[in-house]
Amino acid sequence: MGRPSFQLTDDQARRIMVAVGRLQEAYPAVADNRAFLGGLVNAVLEVTGRLYGVPTYQRILRAYAPTRSPSTKTILSVLVGVQKAMVQTPSTGADHDSCAAAAPAQVLARQEDPTPVRLLAIELEESRRRRLVLEADKARLEAAMSAQQCELARALGQVDSADRALSALADKMAALVNTVTQVTQAEQGGRAFALRAIEAARAESRLWRERYEGLQVLRKEEQALLDSYRRAALGATGAPR
C-alpha cells in the first residue's frame, strides 16, 4: 500500500498502518464505516496531533483501506463527533500548562482542526463540483443529441429521396411495360427485347428496394440511439445535486 500524499514521517505512516490493521480486525464488516472511521480519525489524531479535512481521510482510506468507501457525509459526521468529544473532554490547569510547555506545536495544530462550519464548507464545495460535472455531462449529452438529430434528419432526407426514386421507377416500369406491349403487338420479334427491358427494370427495382430497406434499418438505429440519449439526458437532469 502507498502512503497518502499529505506529509507523514515513516514512523507516522507505520503507526497509522498498524492502527488500520487493528481496526480492520475489530470492524471486519465493510458496511460498518462509522465505527471504523471513528477509530481511524482518533488514530490519526493520536499519531499526528491534529484533525484533517475530509479529502485527507479519503486519501488515507484509499492508501490503507481501499475496501472502505464511506460517503463524504459519513466522514463529516464522524469528524464533528470526534471534535465535539475533544471539546467536551475536561482538562486540569496543570495538564494545560504541561501540554502548552511540552507540545506548543501540537496546540497550534489543534487550533487548525476543522470546525463544523469548515466541514460543511468542504461538503458544499464537493457538491458544487459534482453539480459542475453533471452540468458538463448534460451539455455533452445535449450536443450529442443535437448531432444525432441532424444525422437523423439527413437519413430521413435520404429515405424521402428513395421513396421518390421508387415512385419514379414505378412510373418508368409502367411506361416500359406499355412500350413493350406496343412493340409486341407491332412486331412479334420484339418479345425478346421486351423481356430484357423488363428484367433490367426489375434488377434496377431490386437495387433501389435494397437501398431503401438499408435506409429504413439506418433510420430505426438512429431513432433508437436518439431515444437512448434522451433517456440519458433526462436521467442526468433528474439526478440529485
Image (cartoon, grey):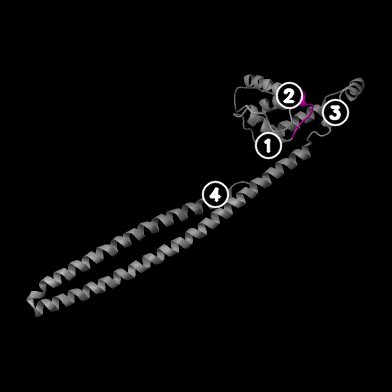
Q: Earlier in the sequence, mark 2 or mark 4?
A: 2
**Residue 14 on image: x %, y %:** 70, 22
Three-letter code, disc 2: Gln
Sequence-first disc among 2 and 1: 2
**Residues drawn in magenta:** 43-52
Q: Nearer the viewer, mark 2 or mark 1?
A: 2
| Circles 2 and 4 in contact, beta carbons < 8 Å | no
2 or 4: mark nearer the eye: 2
Query: What whole-number distance in Å separates the C-alpha atoms at marks 1 and 4?
Result: 23 Å
Q: Secondary structure at mark 3?
A: helix
Residue designated by label 2: 12
What's the CA distance linking mark 2 and mark 4? Answer: 45 Å
Q: Is residue 49 inside the magenta stretch?
A: yes
Q: Is residue 133 left or right of residue 13?
A: left
Q: Position of residue 89 (x, y in %)?
A: 83, 24
Q: CA distance from mark 2 to mark 1?
A: 27 Å
Name the element at disc 4.
Answer: helix
Q: CA distance from mark 3 to mark 1?
A: 30 Å
Looking at the image, residue 6 lies above or below residue 94: below
Q: Residues within 10 Å of mark 4 (few under 14, many from 20)?
A: few
Above or below for 217 versus 197? above
Q: Residue at x 77, y 23 (%)?
A: 46
Which residue in the structure is indicated by mark 3? 105
Mark 3 or 1, nearer chain start: 1
**Distance of label 3 from label 4 (alpha carbons):** 50 Å
Look at mark 4 in the image and give the residue it sits on. Answer: 235
